[in-house]
Image (cartoon, grey):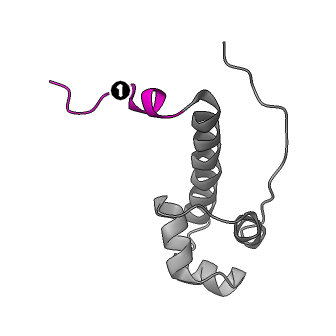
Amino acid sequence: MKEWNDNFDREILTADELQVSNLRVSIISELIKARNNQKISQRELERMSGIRQPIISRLESGATDPMLDTVLKLLASLGMTLEVVPMKRVG
C-alpha cells in the first residue's frame, strides 16, 4: 500500500521547477559527499569557510535555499568549485 504518491513532484511542480529542484539537490548532495569524504564536521567547515554551522545544517537538510555566494564559499573550502556545463535533455 502506497502512502506517498511517486509522481507527487511531477504533479505539483512544472518541468522547469522540477529541473531546478533536481539541480539544487544534486549540488547540495555533492557538497555533503565532499564534506563527509574529507571527514570534516559542519563545525570544522564553519571554521574553514566562515559560514555559520546552523546555516550549513539548514542548507544540507534542504530547509533553506542557499545563496550562490554561500555555496561557492563552502565548495572552495572543500577544494571544489561549481562548473557550468550544458544540461542533459530529457525526452
Between 86 and 67, the one nearer to me in the picture: 67
Task: Say what secondary structure mark 1 lies in.
Answer: loop
Q: Magenta residues: mostly which secondary structure?
A: loop
Q: From the image, which quarter does the C terminus lie in?
A: top right
Q: Is residue 9 magenta?
A: yes
Give the side of residue 2 with respect to residue 48, left or right. Answer: left
Give the side of residue 84 with respect to residue 11, left or right. Answer: right
Q: Which residue is mark 1?
A: 6
In the picture, residue 74 is in which quadrant?
bottom right
Residue extending farthest to the top is 91
Q: Is residue 35 visible?
A: yes
Between 71 and 33, the one nearer to me in the picture: 71
Question: How many discs mark residues in the rendered view?
Answer: 1
Crowding near the residue tagged with mark 1, few <14, some 14–19, many ≥20 C-alpha atoms within 10 Å = few
Q: Is residue 88 magenta?
A: no
Q: What is the x, y in percent for residue 11?
A: 43, 27
Read off the magenta span.
1-13
Q: What is the x, y in percent for residue 85?
A: 85, 38
Between 90 and 36, the one nearer to me in the picture: 90
Please determine whether, in this image, residue 60 is positioned above or below residue 25: below
Q: What is the x, y in percent for residue 22?
A: 59, 39
Three-letter amino acid code at the position of disc 1: Asp
Q: From the image, which quarter does the N terminus lie in?
A: top left
Q: Is residue 41 visible?
A: no
Please determine whether, in this image, residue 22 is positioned above or below residue 83: above
In the picture, residue 16 is in which quadrant?
top right
Residue extending farthest to the left is 1
Residue at (75, 25) in percent of width and height: 88
Residue at (57, 35) in percent of width and height: 18
